[in-house]
């Protein structure tokens, strides 16, 4: 009986932490949308690869505050890139898998 309570406690803690992480990352995405604008999408809903475009487009670099950075420096920003967003699908994969994302 006690082992089940411990297991249930850990499962409940995982749910609470997952919900916290979901809403925290959603808030972070909204903050990035306010600061840099929403990433452009195609008409079918797919996202345009603006992170790659930001390496060569001077107007986009200026809007995102990336002027003066080389393509390698922009690529090295990773999740600190102004256009980086965490999607729910990515978050679900991180929660389900035991490996680091």
Image (tube, helix red, strand yellow):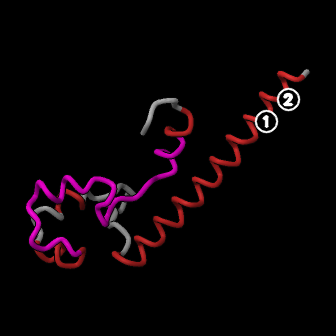
Position in image of residue 56 (x %, y %): 9, 64
Residue at 18% over, 54% down: 75
Left or right placement of residue 4 versus residue 55 in this view: right
**Quadrant the N terminus occupies:** top right
How packed is label 2: few (under 14 Cα within 10 Å), some, or many (20 or more)?
Answer: few
In the displayed structure image, the side of residue 21 where residue 35 appears, left or right: left
The magenta region covers 65-92
Residue 5: mark in rendering? 2
Q: Quarter of the image holding residue 49? A: bottom left
x and y, in percent, of residue 15 in the image = 70, 43
- Give the residue at x 24% y 57%: 77
Q: How many marks?
A: 2
Q: Are marks 2 and 1 in contact (CB under 8 Å)?
A: yes
Magenta-span inclusion, residue 67: yes
Report the Cα–Cα distance between label 2 and label 1: 6 Å
Does the magenta portion include 53? Answer: no
Q: Which residue is mark 1?
A: 9
Task: Name the quadrant containing residue 11.
Answer: top right
């Amino acid at each position: 009986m006690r082992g089940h309570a411990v297991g249930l406690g850990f499962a409940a803690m995982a749910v609470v932490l997952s919900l916290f992480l979901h809403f925290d990352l959603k808030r972070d995405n909204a903050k990035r949308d306010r600061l840099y604008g929403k990433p452009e999408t195609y008409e079918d809903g797919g996202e345009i690869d603006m992170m790659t475009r930001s390496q060569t487009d001077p107007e986009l670099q200026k809007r995102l505050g990336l002027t003066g950075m080389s393509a390698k420096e922009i690529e090295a920003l990773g999740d600190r890139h102004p256009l980086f967003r965490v999607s729910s699908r990515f978050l679900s994969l991180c929660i389900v898998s035991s490996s680091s994302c």
